[in-house]
Amino acid sequence: MKKYFTSESVTEGHPDKICDQISDAVLDAIIKEDPMARVACETCVTTGMVLIMGEITTNCYVEIPKIARDVIKRIGYDRAKYGFDSATCSVLTAIDEQSSDIAMGVDRDGAGDQGMMFGYACDETDTLMPMPIYYAQELAKRLTLVRKENILGFLRPDGKTQVTVEYDEDKPVRIEEIVISTQHSPIVSQAAIKEGIINEVIKRVIPQNLMDENTKILVNPTGQFIIGGPQGDSGLTGRKIIVDTYGGYSRHGGGAFSGKDPTKVDRSAAYMARYIAKNIVKAGFAKKCEVQLAYAIGVAEPVSVYIDLFGTGNVDEEKLMDAVKKVFDLRPREIIKALDLRKPIYEKLAAYGHMGREDLGVAWEKCDKVEELKKAVLN
């Protein structure tokens, strides 16, 4: 039976992703100076304006407006004709300290909030990510690369990608459709845009064996995309949580990542759940694995741990659950320590996904618990 699944990604110039990157750049700057800082930083952007707000408790000082302008400039919004200019946009801040009620729970090594987080892995790609989101992210990365290296000089920072994969009995067999919408110069033809995107983006990313004469390619299907970024649409931190994770292929607990220090289990426990799921699949115990962790505010131990192998497992699930609890310490303080989360690693994660990022060397993408898991399951 043929089935189709679609995932999307966006470039770093998308308004929501501008916000995610600013929030995480503020977090990085603070955590570099004060690793024990408590940060919950939100950003919103619109035409000509950036608002940075939230709760931050730290013993250091960082120049938040300068951080925001530097991020916007690095993304590529550095002139007024792009609709947003890092040098002239207004930057407003509204920062308070973390609530003492929340701090009380975190200070005794409990979770920073209640909630449930999901992690997922499958054998569809080398990074153990679902194929639709994997290629959507790769296309978005390539779209930015050809812009920044001036391979396609007509491109502007805002853009979106979308990939539809055909499955046969749960196995990905081909790509059914690719959609790319990219902001561009007003003096380039749509024919030139399409030709450039197909030759320099799609053909450089998608393996030839996954495409055929029936694969549909849509480039800027509305006809033009000149007005983009914050001029075209307002942006907000945490509004691309599905892009940040598994493209809708797995469930999501609802919490966003960017701008949050690792005491927030929305972020740290989601990374740990991915770490567990990836090691389970890499160990050969299943072709697909989803892990749910749930916490209560101020409580160290998770209130529940759930593992779903979707009928693809070849091991006793009760033994696997016992092995996971033995191999992985799921208390927030221990997650932070195991994944080395008190470092300025976050801005680079704020675009092109937090999961599957083997290119960044993050700890939750390592498969270094495979042997321990095997030993715990088989003994």
Image (cartoon, rainbow, N blue to C red):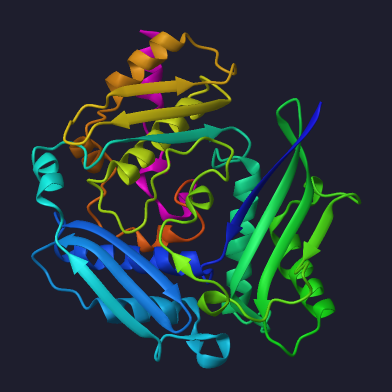
The residue closer to the viewer here, 224 or 75, is 224
User: Magenta residues?
Assistant: 356-379
Is residue 367 shown to the viewer in this render? no
Answer above or below: position of 95 versus 130. Answer: below
Residue 338 locus on image (x, y percent): 25, 39
Among the 4 quarters of the image, the one containing residue 335: top left
Horizontal side of residue 131 vs 21, given as left or right: right
In percent of the image, x 26 and y 27: which residue is there?
Answer: 302
Is residue 291 shown to the viewer in this render? yes
The residue closer to the viewer here, 303 or 127, is 303
Q: How many marks?
A: 0
Among the 4 quarters of the image, the one containing residue 34: bottom left
Horizontal side of residue 29 vs 20, given as left or right: left
Residue 351 locus on image (x, y percent): 48, 61
Residue 311 locus on image (x, y percent): 59, 16
The residue closer to the viewer here, 202 or 82, is 82
Answer above or below: position of 248 versus 69. Answer: above
Residue 379 locus on image (x, y percent): 35, 7
Horizontal side of residue 296 vs 19, given as left or right: left
- Membership of 361 in magenta stretch: yes
Task: Tell me the chief SS of the magenta region.
Answer: helix
In percent of the image, x 52 and y 48: which residue is there?
Answer: 242
Answer above or below: position of 189 versus 295. Answer: below
Answer above or below: position of 167 versus 107. Answer: above
| Quadrant of the drawing holding the N terminus | top right
Farthest right residue in view: 213
Among the 4 quarters of the image, the one containing residue 194: bottom right
In percent of the image, x 33 and y 81: which residue is there?
Answer: 91
- Membership of 189 in magenta stretch: no
